[in-house]
Amino acid sequence: IGACARGSTPPADKPDQTSPVASKQTEEPPQVVAADCQSLLGDFLTALTELDSKVAAGLPFENYGQQVGDIRVTYERIETSSVGSDCLMAVQLPAERAFNRYVEAYNIWNNCVGNGTECTEAEVMSKLEAKWAEATSQIDAAEAALATLPSE
Protein backbone atom coordinates (compact mmCIF):
# COMPACT_ATOMS: atom_id res chain seq x y z
CA ILE A 1 0.00 0.00 0.00
CA GLY A 2 2.83 2.40 0.81
CA ALA A 3 4.33 1.97 -2.65
CA CYS A 4 0.98 2.71 -4.28
CA ALA A 5 0.57 5.84 -2.22
CA ARG A 6 3.87 7.12 -3.57
CA GLY A 7 2.67 6.70 -7.13
CA SER A 8 4.80 3.69 -8.05
CA THR A 9 4.26 2.08 -11.41
CA PRO A 10 3.93 -1.62 -12.20
CA PRO A 11 7.23 -3.43 -12.83
CA ALA A 12 8.52 -3.05 -16.38
CA ASP A 13 8.35 -6.80 -17.03
CA LYS A 14 4.59 -6.87 -16.26
CA PRO A 15 2.96 -3.85 -17.91
CA ASP A 16 -0.72 -3.67 -17.05
CA GLN A 17 -2.31 -2.71 -20.34
CA THR A 18 -5.53 -4.53 -19.47
CA SER A 19 -6.55 -1.92 -16.94
CA PRO A 20 -9.43 0.29 -18.14
CA VAL A 21 -7.61 3.28 -16.68
CA ALA A 22 -4.37 2.49 -18.49
CA SER A 23 -6.08 1.93 -21.84
CA LYS A 24 -8.19 5.06 -21.47
CA GLN A 25 -5.10 7.17 -20.75
CA THR A 26 -3.35 5.91 -23.86
CA GLU A 27 -6.43 6.37 -26.07
CA GLU A 28 -7.33 9.92 -25.07
CA PRO A 29 -4.64 12.52 -24.48
CA PRO A 30 -5.46 14.86 -21.62
CA GLN A 31 -7.13 18.04 -22.72
CA VAL A 32 -5.38 21.09 -21.36
CA VAL A 33 -7.97 23.43 -22.83
CA ALA A 34 -11.41 21.85 -23.01
CA ALA A 35 -13.01 24.88 -24.59
CA ASP A 36 -12.04 28.20 -26.05
CA CYS A 37 -11.63 31.32 -24.00
CA GLN A 38 -14.93 32.84 -25.13
CA SER A 39 -16.97 29.85 -24.01
CA LEU A 40 -15.17 29.71 -20.66
CA LEU A 41 -15.12 33.41 -19.79
CA GLY A 42 -17.73 34.96 -22.07
CA ASP A 43 -20.55 34.99 -19.50
CA PHE A 44 -18.27 36.47 -16.83
CA LEU A 45 -16.99 39.17 -19.16
CA THR A 46 -20.50 39.94 -20.43
CA ALA A 47 -21.76 40.32 -16.84
CA LEU A 48 -18.90 42.71 -16.07
CA THR A 49 -19.65 44.73 -19.20
CA GLU A 50 -23.33 44.94 -18.30
CA LEU A 51 -22.51 46.13 -14.78
CA ASP A 52 -20.13 48.68 -16.24
CA SER A 53 -22.88 50.17 -18.42
CA LYS A 54 -25.40 50.15 -15.54
CA VAL A 55 -22.95 51.91 -13.24
CA ALA A 56 -22.46 54.59 -15.88
CA ALA A 57 -26.25 55.03 -16.01
CA GLY A 58 -26.52 55.55 -12.24
CA LEU A 59 -27.30 52.13 -10.78
CA PRO A 60 -28.74 52.38 -7.22
CA PHE A 61 -26.79 50.80 -4.36
CA GLU A 62 -29.27 47.97 -3.76
CA ASN A 63 -29.16 46.92 -7.39
CA TYR A 64 -25.39 47.31 -7.49
CA GLY A 65 -24.96 44.88 -4.61
CA GLN A 66 -27.23 42.35 -6.32
CA GLN A 67 -25.30 42.67 -9.60
CA VAL A 68 -21.96 42.14 -7.86
CA GLY A 69 -23.37 39.04 -6.13
CA ASP A 70 -24.67 37.66 -9.42
CA ILE A 71 -21.29 38.20 -11.06
CA ARG A 72 -19.60 36.32 -8.22
CA VAL A 73 -21.86 33.33 -8.93
CA THR A 74 -20.97 33.53 -12.64
CA TYR A 75 -17.27 33.74 -11.78
CA GLU A 76 -17.46 30.72 -9.48
CA ARG A 77 -18.89 28.64 -12.34
CA ILE A 78 -15.78 29.08 -14.50
CA GLU A 79 -13.99 25.79 -15.02
CA THR A 80 -10.59 27.18 -14.12
CA SER A 81 -8.81 23.93 -14.86
CA SER A 82 -9.90 24.31 -18.48
CA VAL A 83 -8.56 27.82 -18.93
CA GLY A 84 -5.41 27.82 -21.04
CA SER A 85 -2.46 30.00 -20.09
CA ASP A 86 -3.02 32.50 -22.93
CA CYS A 87 -6.65 32.93 -21.93
CA LEU A 88 -5.75 33.10 -18.26
CA MET A 89 -3.11 35.79 -18.65
CA ALA A 90 -4.79 37.88 -21.32
CA VAL A 91 -8.47 37.63 -20.39
CA GLN A 92 -9.20 36.01 -17.03
CA LEU A 93 -6.74 38.03 -14.95
CA PRO A 94 -7.89 41.46 -16.18
CA ALA A 95 -11.52 40.35 -15.83
CA GLU A 96 -10.82 39.24 -12.26
CA ARG A 97 -9.13 42.58 -11.55
CA ALA A 98 -12.23 44.36 -12.87
CA PHE A 99 -14.45 42.25 -10.65
CA ASN A 100 -12.23 42.97 -7.66
CA ARG A 101 -12.53 46.73 -8.30
CA TYR A 102 -16.33 46.36 -8.33
CA VAL A 103 -16.17 44.46 -5.02
CA GLU A 104 -13.92 47.14 -3.53
CA ALA A 105 -16.36 49.82 -4.71
CA TYR A 106 -19.22 47.85 -3.17
CA ASN A 107 -17.38 47.73 0.16
CA ILE A 108 -16.71 51.48 0.07
CA TRP A 109 -20.33 52.19 -0.81
CA ASN A 110 -21.66 49.72 1.74
CA ASN A 111 -19.54 51.22 4.51
CA CYS A 112 -20.92 54.63 3.63
CA VAL A 113 -24.55 53.50 3.44
CA GLY A 114 -24.38 51.12 6.39
CA ASN A 115 -22.42 53.16 8.91
CA GLY A 116 -25.55 54.70 10.43
CA THR A 117 -24.57 58.24 9.63
CA GLU A 118 -25.01 60.33 6.56
CA CYS A 119 -22.05 60.27 4.27
CA THR A 120 -21.90 62.86 1.59
CA GLU A 121 -21.89 62.04 -2.05
CA ALA A 122 -18.66 63.96 -2.42
CA GLU A 123 -16.97 61.75 0.19
CA VAL A 124 -17.78 58.53 -1.53
CA MET A 125 -18.29 59.30 -5.23
CA SER A 126 -14.67 60.10 -6.05
CA LYS A 127 -13.57 56.78 -4.52
CA LEU A 128 -16.29 54.85 -6.32
CA GLU A 129 -15.57 56.52 -9.64
CA ALA A 130 -11.87 55.68 -9.30
CA LYS A 131 -12.66 52.00 -8.67
CA TRP A 132 -15.16 51.92 -11.51
CA ALA A 133 -12.69 53.57 -13.90
CA GLU A 134 -10.10 50.92 -13.02
CA ALA A 135 -12.71 48.21 -13.63
CA THR A 136 -13.62 49.69 -17.01
CA SER A 137 -9.96 49.76 -18.02
CA GLN A 138 -9.52 46.09 -17.06
CA ILE A 139 -12.70 45.07 -18.88
CA ASP A 140 -11.46 46.86 -22.00
CA ALA A 141 -8.14 45.02 -21.74
CA ALA A 142 -9.85 41.64 -21.31
CA GLU A 143 -12.21 42.25 -24.24
CA ALA A 144 -9.38 43.38 -26.51
CA ALA A 145 -7.33 40.32 -25.61
CA LEU A 146 -10.28 38.00 -26.11
CA ALA A 147 -10.77 39.36 -29.62
CA THR A 148 -7.18 38.43 -30.51
CA LEU A 149 -7.20 34.87 -29.18
CA PRO A 150 -7.95 32.06 -31.61
CA SER A 151 -11.12 30.04 -31.13
CA GLU A 152 -10.67 26.35 -30.40
Image (cartoon, grey):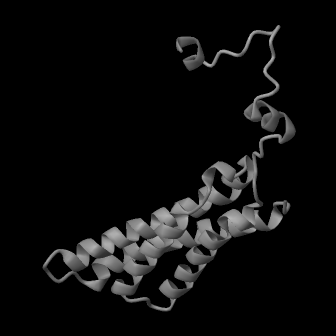
- Residue nearest the observer in this picture, 47 or 104: 47
The image shows a total of numbered marks equal to: 0
Report the side of 74 relative to 34 (left or right): left
User: Is 30 on the left-hand or right-hand side of 5?
Assistant: right
Quadrant where the C terminus is found in the figure: bottom right
Residue 53 position (above or below residue 15): below
Task: From the viewer's perspective, tell me whether residue 97 is left or right of residue 152.
Answer: left
Foreground pick, 97 / 14: 14
Q: Residue at x 46, y 65 (%)?
A: 101
Foreground pick, 17 / 64:
17
Instruction: Identify which residue, 102 or 3, lies in the foreground.
Output: 3
Q: Position of residue 94 (x, y in %)?
A: 61, 60
Residue 59 appears in the figure: yes
What residue is shown at x 34% (from left), y 85% (from top)?
62
Residue 112 % position (x, y): 24, 76
Residue 11 position by quadrant: top right
Q: Where is residue 93 in the image (x, y as percent from the top left)?
A: 60, 55
Toward the left, the furthest residue is 116
**Horizontal relation, residue 93 to residue 152: left or right:** left
Residue 32 sits in which quadrant?
top right
> As displayed, is residue 54 above or below residue 93?
below
Q: In this view, does 61 lie above or below 100?
A: below
Query: What residue sits 60% from the left and 65% below the top?
Result: 138
Res. 141 in view: no
In terms of image quadrants, where is residue 9?
A: top right
Most distant residue in the bottom direction: 57
